[in-house]
Amino acid sequence: QVQLVESGGGLVQAGGSLTLSCAASGRTSSIYAMGWFRQAPGKEREFVAAIGWSGGDTKYSDPVKGRLAISRDNIKNTLYLQMNSLKLEDTAVYFCAASTRWGMIGITQYGYPHWGQGTQVTVSP
């Protein structure tokens, strides 16, 4: 099994920055892709960004391209999401997810069987 714990959420003003972290434990050697998803109140969970094992292959949703950056440290078993130029519409609960399906970097939640509990990000005017 894989356990994921997010941290780093909080309240930030529009235009500001925030870095989320996701610590993985358990069978971390089996993880290939990791991703960030978010869910705003009254909306469905949506894809934000994903990264393959080596860190060299990344995918982003259009609303966050150029503002958010995903990275991972396989020694520390930690996933990161650097969030810059934050907008009001970035307010959501951010979830970390992991997949053990080797070679696949999914952009839908159905490709990730392992999930964290989420961390709240609130962007104020």
Image: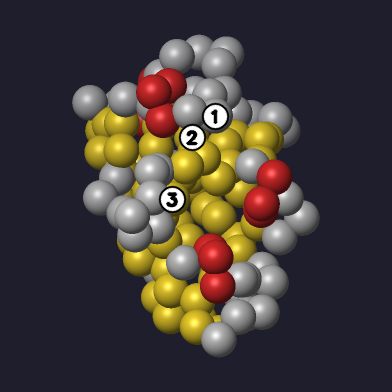
Count of labels in the image: 3
Residue at position x 22%, y 26% in the image: 1
> Which numbered dot is residue 107?
1
- The residue labelled by disc 3 is 38
Badge 3 crowding class, 10 Å Cα cut-off, few under 14, some 14 to 19, many 20 or more, is many
Identify the mark nearer the N-term, 1 or 2. 2
**For residue 37, which quarter of the picture?**
top left
Per the model, the C-alpha gap separating discs 2 and 3 is: 14 Å
Q: Nearer the viewer, mark 1 or mark 2?
A: 1
Q: Quadrant of the C terminus?
A: bottom right
Residue at position x 33%, y 55% in the image: 42
Please tell me whether mark 3 sits on a helix, a strand or a loop: strand
Q: Residue 105 at x, y = what percent?
A: 57, 23
Please tell me whether mark 1 sits on a helix, a strand or a loop: loop
Please tell me whether mark 2 sits on a helix, a strand or a loop: strand
> Which numbered dot is residue 34?
2
Residue at position x 31%, y 31% in the image: 114
Amino acid type at mark 2: Met
Badge 2 crowding class, 10 Å Cα cut-off, few under 14, some 14 to 19, many 20 or more, is many
